[in-house]
């Protein structure tokens, strides 16, 4: 536990910070109750600058106790800040820079400024880091659970589907403040009625609204709540609209050390891993390239990292070692770069991973690991791999002349989401058996392992498939089957057929022709223990996490009807469908 708190904390409320266009943003300032200058940490978010003030363990209170000033700021168009509109993430680069510039001129700032915060408060950091001009007083950053690519892991997914399960309810939750600011409080009950009645701040949509067609009706329905949704639909392709806020395209603009913190079941795991990797490889100077840190734990998106809990995410308890004092890691980070203290952080390897299954933390020198042995596990069957009761199997032996597997994908009856890297809808670890009885899922399971098998790194599925549709989706999921048959989801992914080769340049498919698909399952660090089995699920939907493909090739969101399609999956010498796993030798 962190000890030896040095200062009492006082607050200065409702401080206005001017932006370059004359708009004033509101901030609360938490500072040590002592004279003198201090280094400053910035939290910039859309949820209300005082929304965390009641938590005495929050960083707003923690860091001032240790000699930092913390500025908690409402983003433009949110709560106490000025601004007639709110456009998530896109507005944060300039406003973040101007906030740093104002702070650097205050008599209480010692010239050292850093950033911290989780989720959207991490996204504001990644967006700020895209700026081609790095402020000289910005010394380091620490984004937590945030997307470094707003297109590929916020609005859409790497494979091209919409992140449907969280995007619309999240827009409603944030939009309630938009209605209040516009004096339209009378509309709030109407939008709240779309959400499930739960005790959570982030409440999912009711099923009938997730299922509503056409999807573009939401653009009109939420015009008062989230006017930016129309731009999201109109910019389905990965193009210039998104690139200004894509850190991975602008990693050469990063001039400062960054600590990237994420989780294996986090919806923004992509942001943590790709952000770390892109800046480590292509940062704008040696200081940035040589001083990226990565921490990945066994949690989902929002976790009480520093509280004494052993639960991970969903069903699984990852053991007494899974919680970490994240504040201590951050304090060591900030003290080194902003107070020039020798905290030992430079002596430690740059990567700290939690290895699930073994349930232990481990330091590594890079990501992905150089000692990785990428290994193909091939799909096999006698043509009846449907459901977990079928004849599908998985092994390192290449497929030969085997019959194909088929299923009917009916978007009116999609495979339901059951955990995984999502948000608002239930996320994390869940037993997959309740959905594995479906005949529209192909299940390939290995024999029980005769020794432990560690998988740490990026995962992908190579799929050879045909469909009777003009466009369709294919999904893949890696599962750990325990000796008691509990089926633990590890990672999953999706590919929209027209985006199989490019997210910028779609290419249609033709019915009944065989195409090669690469499904990105992101990454994990997990040990399949002796006696456990590896399993791969193949299907065409994961709803409501991802929007359903109506199989029509119509423009996004315009379909009012959905068509069924027959899907054929090939595994043979000519069409060797397989999962590629990053095996780590012990």
Image: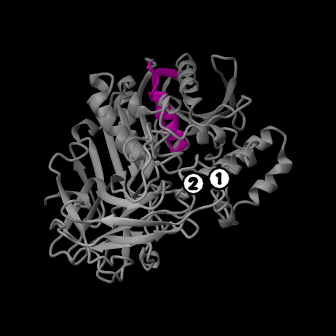
| Extent of the magenta region | 109-132
Q: Residue at x 65, y 52 (%)?
A: 215
**Tag 2–tag 1 contact (CB < 8 Å):** yes
Task: Say whether residue 224 is magenta.
Answer: no
Drawn side of residue 167 relative to residue 345, left or right: right
Mark in the foreground, 2 or 1: 1
Residue 349 visible: yes
Of residues 260 and 175, the one drawn nearer to the viewer in this rendering = 175
Of residues 501 and 42, the one drawn nearer to the viewer in this rendering = 501
Q: Which mark is residue 164?
A: 2
Q: How much space separates mark 2 and mark 1, taking CA atoms?
A: 10 Å
Colour scheme? one colour
Q: Which mark is residue 192?
A: none
Instruction: Report which quarter residue 280 is drawn in.
Output: top left
Residue where numbered disc 1 is placed: 215
Please identify the quadrant where the C terminus is shown.
bottom left
Q: Secondary structure at mark 2?
A: helix
């Amino acid at each position: 536990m962190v000890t030896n708190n040095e200062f009492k904390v006082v607050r200065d409320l409702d401080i206005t910070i001017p932006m370059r266009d004359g708009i004033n943003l509101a901030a609360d300032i938490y500072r040590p109750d002592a004279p003198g200058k201090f280094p400053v940490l910035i939290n910039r978010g859309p949820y209300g600058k005082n929304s965390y003030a009641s938590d005495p363990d929050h960083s707003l209170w923690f860091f001032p106790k240790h000699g930092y000033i913390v500025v908690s700021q409402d983003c433009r168009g949110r709560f106490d800040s000025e601004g007639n509109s709110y456009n998530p993430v896109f507005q944060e680069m300039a406003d973040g820079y101007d906030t740093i510039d104002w702070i650097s001129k205050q008599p209480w700032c010692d010239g050292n400024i850093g950033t911290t915060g989780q989720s959207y408060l991490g996204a504001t950091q990644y967006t700020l880091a895209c700026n081609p001009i790095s402020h000289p007083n910005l010394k380091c950053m620490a984004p937590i659970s945030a997307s470094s690519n707003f297109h590929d892991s916020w609005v859409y997914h790497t494979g091209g589907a919409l992140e449907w399960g969280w995007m619309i309810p999240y827009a409603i939750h944030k939009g309630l403040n938009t209605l209040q600011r516009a004096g339209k409080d009378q509309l709030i009950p109407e939008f709240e009625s779309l959400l499930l009645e739960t005790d959570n701040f982030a409440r999912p949509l009711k099923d009938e609204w997730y299922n509503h067609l056409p999807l573009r009706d939401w653009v009109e329905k939420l015009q008062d709540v989230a006017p930016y949704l129309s731009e999201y639909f109109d910019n389905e392709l990965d193009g210039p609209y998104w690139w200004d806020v894509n850190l991975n395209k602008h990693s050469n603009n990063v001039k400062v050390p960054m600590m990237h913190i994420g989780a294996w079941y986090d919806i923004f795991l992509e942001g943590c891993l790709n952000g770390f990797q892109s800046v480590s490889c292509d940062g704008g100077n040696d200081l940035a390239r040589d001083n990226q840190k990565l921490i990945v734990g066994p949690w989902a998106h929002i976790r009480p990292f520093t509280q004494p809990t052993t639960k991970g995410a969903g069903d699984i308890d990852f053991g007494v070692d899974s919680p970490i004092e994240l504040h201590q890691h951050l304090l060591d980070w900030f003290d080194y770069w902003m107070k020039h203290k020798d905290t030992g952080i430079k002596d430690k390897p740059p990567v700290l991973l939690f290895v699930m299954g073994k349930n232990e933390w481990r330091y590594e020198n890079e990501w992905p690991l150089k000692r990785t042995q990428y290994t193909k596990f091939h799909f096999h069957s006698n043509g009846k791999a449907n459901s977990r009761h079928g004849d599908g199997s998985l092994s390192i032996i290449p497929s030969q002349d085997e019959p194909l597997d088929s299923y009917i994908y009916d978007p009116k009856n999609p495979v339901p989401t059951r955990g995984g890297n999502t948000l608002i809808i239930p996320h994390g670890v869940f037993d997959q058996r309740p959905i594995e009885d479906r005949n529209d899922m192909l299940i390939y399971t290995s024999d029980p392992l005769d020794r432990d098998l560690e998988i740490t790194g990026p995962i992908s599925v190579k799929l050879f498939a045909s469909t009777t549709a003009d466009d369709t989706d294919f999904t893949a999921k890696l599962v750990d089957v325990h000796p008691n048959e509990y089926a633990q989801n590890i990672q999953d992914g999706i590919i929209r057929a027209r985006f199989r080769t490019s997210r910028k340049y779609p290419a249609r498919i033709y019915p009944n022709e065989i195409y090669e698909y690469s499904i990105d399952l992101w990454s994990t660090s997990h040990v399949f223990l002796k006696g456990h089995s590896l399993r791969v699920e193949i299907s065409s939907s994961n709803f409501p996490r991802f929007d359903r493909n109506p199989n029509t090739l119509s423009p996004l969101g315009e379909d009012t009807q959905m068509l069924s399609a027959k899907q054929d999956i090939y595994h043979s010498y000519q069409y060797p469908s397989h999962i590629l796993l990053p095996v780590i030798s012990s």
